[in-house]
Image (cartoon, coloured by chain):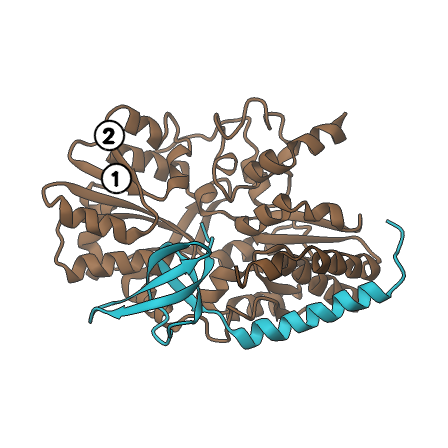
Amino acid sequence: MCLAIPGKVVEATDLGFTRIAKVQFGGVTRQVSLDFVPETQIGDYVLVHVGFAISRLSPEEAERTYELLRQIQEADEIAPEEPL
Amino acid sequence: MKYLDEYRDADITHALAARIRARATKPWVLMEICGGQTHTLMRYGLPDLLPPEIELVHGPGCPVCVAPLEFVDRAIEIASRPGVIFVSYGDMLRVPGSRQDLFRVRAAGGDVRIAYSPLEAVKLAQEYPTRQVVFFGIGFETTAPANAMAVWHAKRLGLTNFSMLVSHVLVPPAVRLLLGSPANRVQGFIAPGHVCTVMAHREYEALSAEFHVPIVVGGFEPVDLLEAIAMLVDQLEDGRAQLENQYSRSVTRDGNVAAQKLMEEVFEITDRKWRGIGMIPASGHRLREEYAAYDAERIFGAQEIHVEEPAECISALVLQGLKKPVDCTAFGTRCTPEQPLGAPMVSSEGACAAYYAYRRHTASEAAQ
């Protein structure tokens, strides 16, 4: 139920009472409401739940945590393999 | 796909698992609250990468599973009425009521439709002005703003043939109940990342401080979950108990303020009964008085129905993390996704369905 999928905003239209976007998920494009993330720009990635974008994904935060994860991976490759 | 592939990376997943194995020295019981997280864990076989010290128990975060039997019966009763178009998220259709499910209502000629978004139900109400369109509004804080928006649009459009059967539940009161229970074994929690995307993590910060328990807000991909588990194990081994946010690419300090505002405009907090758990004070939503014209319970008349759960189903204990699905005598035999006894076997987020889809063979091997 709480499933939310990341997608890329490729088009946005302002209808006055609501703002609608076309969001690309891999090869599929769907219409999504931007009412809960009004600051969203074309090119942003949003998390979409039941037809609504619920957050704008932060590239800085994603990069920061991903860098940490890469360090963990590198440390693991250097460390001697532990027996399973 | 960006923001998905990198969080499914096998090398990083294994590196995180190695870090957890190296760090864990004592047995720790962890709970992932959200059923979506349970499914990722099972689908990717993540428990098999963890050391024997780490036990994962599965939480009540499956709105379909905790929707009370009375509500399912109520939905079935409304859906069976002539002239009604009953619209629901797909998961809800096979959930057994006390006598039948929504699929059987449809087979018997009822107009029951599946929607991806609650706005589809609003559109149906516009297209069929002579029919009553009823939307089954279930979900946690992630879904409540979308459902609120559907009601808000119905009011904006002046629709008189749209209503919602609201059965929303809130996560923090259920976590509080688990933590306060003498039977609680859980020592660390993975908080639901999408609920926190909407609500921020203040409520979990308070729970962490009050019960002195580590809580990490976690995402839904394998790397997210193993990182959250690693963060919990670090806290437990260090003797710390605080709130940390693993899912910072989506969860911000204030959450989604626009979504919170609309939810508060349309809904108010109420006591809710949780299937298998019972009444939890201030644990759900109902429509505010100003939106009473869209309340299916008022339109179709409230009914007190008392029904009993099937005796063999242990979903109450599964939902509280006290039993595993494979501990149930009916698991995989008298209870399957095709013929479920309880909701956790139906929902794509139910723990029983996750074990059935991904672990029933290993579970039966272990039993032999």
Q: Is residue B337 above or below residue B234?
A: above
Q: In screen coordinates, is B255 left or right of B11?
A: left
Which one of the lettered chains is coloured brown? B
- Residue B111: percent from the left, percent from the top? 23, 33
The residue to which callout 2 is attached is B110
Query: Disc 2 residue type?
Result: Gly
For the question of whether residue B183 can be seen, the reply is no
Tell which subunit mark 1 falls on: B
Of residues B182 and B56, the one nearer the viewer is: B56
Q: Residue furthest front?
A: A27
Q: How many residues crowd mark 2 within 10 Å: few (<14), some (14–19), many (20+)?
A: many
Which one of the lettered chains is coloured cyan? A
The quadrant in which residue B188 appears is bottom right
Q: In screen coordinates, is B44 left or right of B71?
A: right
Which quarter shows the C terminus of chain B?
Answer: top right
The quadrant in which residue B358 appears is top right
Of residues A18 and A26, the one nearer the viewer is: A26
Of pointers 1 and 2, the one earlier in the residue sequence: 1
For the question of whether residue B170 can be seen, the reply is yes
The residue to which callout 1 is attached is B86
Q: Is residue B42 above or below residue B345?
A: below
The quadrant in which residue B150 appears is bottom left
Residue in view at x 58 percent, y 65 percent: B207
Query: Disc 1 residue type?
Result: Phe
Count the marks. 2
Of residues A14 and B173, the one nearer the viewer is: A14
